[in-house]
Image (cartoon, grey):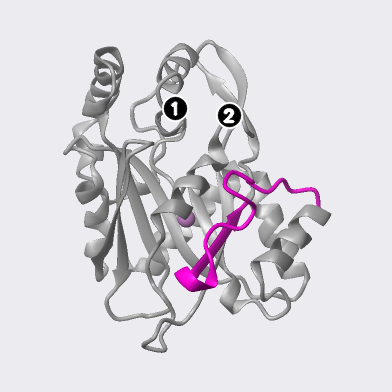
Amino acid sequence: MTYQEIFEKLWEDYTNHNPAVKNVYDLFVSHGEEVVNDHIAFRTFNDERIGIDKLAEVFKKVDYAQSGEYFFPEKKLRALHFEHELDVNAPRVFISELQVEQFSESFQQIVKETIDRIPEKMLQSDKLIYSGTVWGDVSYETYEALRKESEYAAWLYAFGFRANHFTISVNHLKNFTEIASVNQLLKENGFLINDSGGEIKGSKEQFLQQSSIKAGIINFPFVEGNQFIPGCYYEFAKRYPTSSGELYGGFIADSANKVFESTDFRKA
Ligand code: NI
């Protein structure tokens, strides 16, 4: 498998399950833009069977290497980002994992039992990264129990392994060259911007500005019956050159901390 094939699988899954993100993509294409992907992001638990190192394996096979490390103490998360070693145009991969031991005993038990349900064969498969809820049926009662302690965990339990978001590289847009003009276009077309921490996260001085739409609401088939819950979202990133003259390639923890809230149920 090539890295392009992995991203195609992820894109197919992401757009099939989230009509709103396909609408965002189509909106930019209809304005004559070529949409280039800055990065994608995954969520997981820090169990060694499915932790960051596990999810990164498939990307390492196609020449990705570890780059930055980030901590989000408020959300009890750790993250790593990976960059392609040869192709500078390849999207970055951002993988975060929940520090499960920092939650209640009952929460830890739910997470362990969920991971125990993943078939061994799936844990060994390169397809794991786009296979969604590999633990089988998803219960609304369990979703709510997790959500009391972590919105991140509830989202992960319901959606599993797939891109949590893709990110349009604003540097590659011809007509919408500022995050503010991107946000304006989105709002004019009825999309809600995640305004936690402001509509634009980060600054030129930090070499990275980001924004995101709030996740679209999905009619989700829980075992107890359907419920409307937040799905995936689309992010937008503009990178600035550092003193070396090259565009900054990393992430800003304070900004990412707020971007995570694009799937926050109460704010969506
Ligand atoms: Ni992101």
Query: Would you call the spot at circle 2 few (<14 residues within 10 Å), some (14-19), or many (20 or more)?
Result: some
Say what amino acid the circle numbered 1 marks: Ala
Q: Which picture quadrant has residue 142?
A: top left
Q: Which mark is residue 46?
A: none
Above-or-below relation of 254 to 115: below
Query: Which residue lies under the disc numbered 1?
Result: 154
In what quadrant of the picture does the N terminus appear? bottom left
Magenta highlight on residue 196: yes
Relative to 176, is 125 on the left or the right? left
Query: Which residue lies under the disc numbered 2?
Result: 265
- Disc 1 versus disc 2: distance between alpha carbons? 10 Å
Residue name at image x 46 percent, y 34 percent: 159
Residue name at image x 25 percent, y 71 percent: 63
Q: Residue furthest bottom?
A: 245
Label 1: state its secondary structure: helix
Relative to 142, is 263 on the left or the right? right
Evaluate if marks 1 and 2 touch, with contact meaning CB atoms under 8 Å apart.
Answer: yes
Above-or-below relation of 105 to 228: above
Magenta highlight on residue 261: no
Residue 6 location (% of width, % of height): 39, 60
Closer to us: 144 or 254: 254
Magenta residues, start to end: 189-212
Relative to 27, is 229 on the left or the right? left
Residue 246 location (% of width, % of height): 41, 85
Closer to us: 179 or 216: 179
